[in-house]
Image (cartoon, helix red, strand yellow):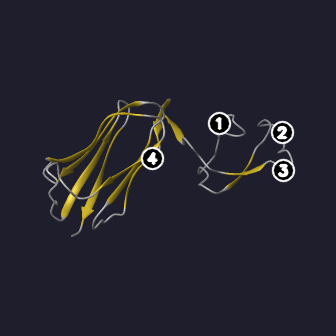
Amino acid sequence: MLCGETIRLLASGTLPQIGDRWIIYPSEYSPPIKGNIYRFTPTNYVTESKSRLTPISFNLYPIPCTKNLMITYSLLKMEKIKLVIYDILGRQVKCLKDGFEKSSIHSVLWNGLDEKNRKVSAGIYFCRFETADYKATKKIILIR
């Protein structure tokens, strides 16, 4: 949003990163207005892919983790999500979220415990993030 207005960012090549400078043009055919230089700070950062909007972020850190794993994701609209940790054999270890979430950037902390609040052993796990339109799985390396 710029001064309360949503803008559409068109980029050729790489998209700007948080903190980059960018210039507002009144139209694609006119030069920039003097002084219209802004810092890039997205709130709901999305990309268009095959004519549908998809969340651009689903991230895990730190990898490898020793204690706690931070999981971040963004949603474009209020929708049902499911966020689950699985072991290497595909067994569900912990369901972190299963329900509706608002449009925003969200963070969830996994403390390395299973559904019965027992410490899981060191090894490889998977974090599965699902919405109606988006599904992704990322690998977790847990070191004890």
Real-space CA distance between mark 1 and mark 3, rounded to the nearest whole angstrom: 19 Å
Q: Nearer the viewer, residue 113 or 23?
A: 113
Q: Position of residue 116 (x, y in %)?
A: 13, 50
Mark 2 neighbour density, 10 Å: few (under 14) some (14–19) many (20 or more): few
**Which quadrant: the C terminus?**
bottom left
**Which residue lies under the disc numbered 1?**
8
* Residue assigned mark 4: 57
Q: Mark 3 or mark 2, which is nearer the start of the sequence?
A: 2
Where is mark 3, residue-wise?
Answer: 35
Three-letter code, disc 2: Ser
Q: Residues within 10 Å of mark 4 (few under 14, many from 20)?
A: few
Q: CA distance from mark 4 to mark 1?
A: 18 Å
The mark closer to the camera, 1 or 3, is 3
* Nearer-N-terminus badge (4/1): 1
Circle 2: element type: loop
Left or right: 112 as drawn, with respect to 18: left
Q: Dots 2 and 3: beta carbons under 8 Å?
A: no
Residue at 72%, 39% in the rendered image: 3
Residue 30 marker: 2
Q: Nearer the viewer, mark 2 or mark 1?
A: 1
Mark 1: amino acid: Arg
Check the picture and name the quadrant holding the N terminus: top right
